[in-house]
Amino acid sequence: MLLNPEQNAMLDGSRGYATRKAMQILVALGEIYGAERMIPVSSVQIAGVSYDNLGEAGLQFLSEMADGGGKVCVQTTLNPAGMDIENWRSLGIQPDFAEKQGRVLEAYSRMGVSTTCTCTPYLTGNRPLFGEHIAWSESSAVCYANSVLGARTNREGGPSALASALTGLTPEYGYHLAKNRRPTLTFQLSTRLKETSEFGGLGKMIGEHIQVSKGIPYIKGIQSATLENLKSLCASLATYGGAALFHMQGVTPEASSFTPPLEQVEVSQPELESVMQSLNDATAAEVDFVSLGCPHLSIHEIEQIARLLEGQHVKKEFWIATARATRQIADQLGYTRIIEAAGAKFAADTCCVVAPIQGRFTAMATDSAKACYYAAAKNKFKTLLLPFDEVVRLALQ
Ligand code: F3S
């Protein structure tokens, strides 16, 4: 790779241990993917925050980077942690885990990372503009940034995202280049989607198609989609297909620059239903855990929950996962009071996937196809995928 004098100085260690290590990571990545140069990034989102995923080795790496003088030089936000930073006890988190999670957050904080702990940074102030080069990890947010916002990022891992934060750079390859953003396969819907859970189901279906071809989907036939629909679709496409980018005719900003690819897959209502049904191996009677907020909930979704729970009491453990900043808006608007009076619990800063809850429940109900995948694969729960409102109603039964 061609590095300029400043980048060479970072690599030879004259800016300290952490910057050298960061530059080594980026150069290695660039060489693997054939990048010719580094380009500046304006925003970073770092995944790899929960101690449940990082373990001792991850904590040690972060501590070394912080001790080695690492300091971010662009806006940098964090993915969810393994617990609600303030109310971890109410979620059943053990003190030993909380102590280690605290050390992870402290290491990030020493490097100047905003410890926002959300997978929807675009809802809480880290929202890049069209065409901006960024370095994000967190697969659902990567897909949202590329597709819905039209920003440009590869699917970074935690260490490479941190490396970009510490240098303000990323190697120029993959989705940073216009030629790699062209759609390769059209998906034509002949059914109307209403529920966010249906968008998640669509993401699973398309994801499984493109998993093999590694293509970029061009989706036709959706008249309109809300922010909540799109964040669910992004999470699902990334989970089931490894997708980092899609285009949706009439909805996403780059779609009009392309002609839909000739190769086309039809998506019908029965097929979609069967994909969604494949995520249901629990009965309603078996559900002992209800979770909404994968990806983290918007304030609009929290308002909906408050409306449905007002004056009632939940009969199951019910987690509402969101960013702390969104929870604070909910506090001000009175939604938190209604939700907590009903016995549901906010899981701010965390979620049902990254919290250490393996073995605690038998079956989980959710509106998120992504959460179903990890509930089964990581936590060994049975799952029930339902529309948003029905998930809330089930918590009351
Ligand atoms: Fe976010 Fe956790 Fe889902 S990080 S996308 S809520 S698995």
Image: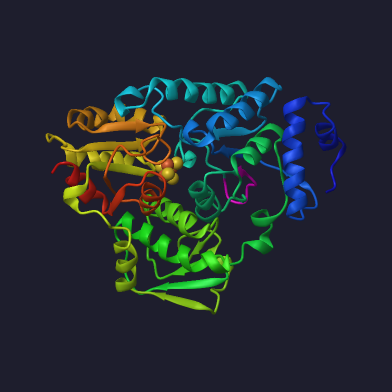
Where does ligand 1 appear, by image quarter? top left
Identity of the residue furthest to the bottom in this view: 262
What segment carries the magenta color? 129-135
Q: Nearer the viewer, residue 197 or 94?
A: 94
Asked where in the image residue 201 lies, by quadrant, the reply is bottom left
Residue 217 visible within the image: no
x then y, percent, for residue 154: 62, 51
The colour style of the image is: rainbow
Residue at left 80%, top 52%? 36
**Dominant SS in magenta:** loop
Residue at left 52%, top 44%? 138
Asked where in the image residue 357 lies, by quadrant, the reply is top left
Name the side, left or right, on which 246 lies relative to 19: left
Residue at left 55%, top 75%? 261
Name the side, left or right, on which 198 lies relative to 78: left
- Is 134 within the magenta? yes
Residue 308 visible within the image: yes
Residue at left 32%, top 27%? 92
- Is 153 within the magenta? no
x then y, percent, for residue 395: 19, 42
* Above or below 67: residue 136: below
* Above or below 99: residue 353: below
Q: Nearer the viewer, residue 175 or 132?
A: 175
Please give the count of numbered marks on the rendered protein: 0
Name the side, left or right, on which 143 lies relative to 299: right
x then y, percent, for residue 372: 35, 51
